[in-house]
Amino acid sequence: ESTLGAAAAQSGRYFGTAIASGRLGDSTYTSIANREFNSVTAENEMKIDATEPQRGQFNFAAADRVFNWAVQNGKQVRGHTLAWHSQQPGWMQNLSGGTLRQAMNDHIKGVMAHYKGKIAQWDVVNEAFADGSSGARRDSNLQRTGNDWIEDAFRTARAADPAAKLCYNDYNVENWTWAKTQAMYNMVKDFKQRGVPIDCVGFQSHFNSGSPYNSNFRTTLQNFAALGVDVAVTELDIQGAPATTYADVTKDCLAVPRCLGITVWGVRDTDSWRPEHTPLLFNGDGSKKPAYTAVLNAL
Ligand code: XIL
């Protein structure tokens, strides 16, 4: 196959990218994105601050620009993200307790209703665990509403759109030996045992010198899949874009039947959120990097 999306589709998977609404007027960007990818995640436009800037007043203008571009070009959409400590609007940052819990659930209902039946996967909760060796939850205003905030969010999400796969998404959870990975594993195991509605786990996979790729990522994906959830690589970027590491990540997903697909976090290096601007599959001029060919050959 000659594109990432078509190659991934040969095994029933997708190959996606993050799309920024502000770049949709750039024809180099859109032509690469449309040619190579068959899944889209809005880089920022479906986050809480963008979709509910004032409490109870939803704004889907930017989100719909990304969503409509994706659907009009035949791509599936990953929804990102409904409950998160970051990129909260000011009004939500200032809430706590039962009021915040209610606002979280109202937000989930409002956004999911707008896209009901049209989103393949939703990142219901993002980044709820702390980095380091504690294995603890990350402190946040949402966490301070009570430890059950995550399962509350998933139950609300299931009721709001029963057709969407509901994912938990996090970073620094790819290495099986890390405490954060084990903490996330124990949560998902507990949710499955108690019937909390969770369908998938997203591994952001922002690899860099501080959190490098390790070949035990495949073990991690296999162990989560064995709990009865799908897995996905949701925000892949690798500092320096070494071709071998990109191929390894691709092979890890392909080795796990429940790995749904891979999303890279941007199109060209110049589109990347990473300050180094080196981690993606295309150069700033739109040409293919060695990592692109390595991924295509591995698919
Ligand atoms: C990033 C975006 O790429 C940036 O444009 C924005 O300034 C900050 O957020 N984990 C996530 C993503 O779940 O939403 C983040 O995206 C990257 C880390």
Image (cartoon, helix red, strand yellow):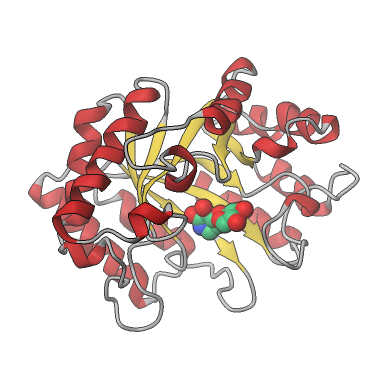
- Left or right: residue 35 versus residue 15 is right
Residue 281 can be seen, yes or no: yes
**Horizontal relation, residue 263 to residue 139: left or right:** right
Where does the C terminus fall, quadrant-wise? Answer: top right
Front residue of 193/138: it is 138
| 172 or 113: nearer the viewer | 113
* Quadrant in which residue 38 is drawn: top right
Residue 71 versus residue 228: which sits nearer the camera? Answer: 71
On the question of residue 12 being in view, the answer is no
Total marks placed: 0
Picture coordinates of residue 240 (x, y %)? 76, 66
Residue 78, horizontal then vertical, whole percent? 47, 35
Left or right for 17, reference 258 = right
Residue 23, compared with residue 96, is above or below; it is: above
Q: Position of residue 201 (x, y in %)?
A: 36, 50
Name of the residue lying farthest toward the left: 194
Position of residue 16 relative to residue 147, above or below, is above
Residue sitting at x 77%, y 62%? 278
Going 80% across and 47% down the picture, which residue do you hit?
282
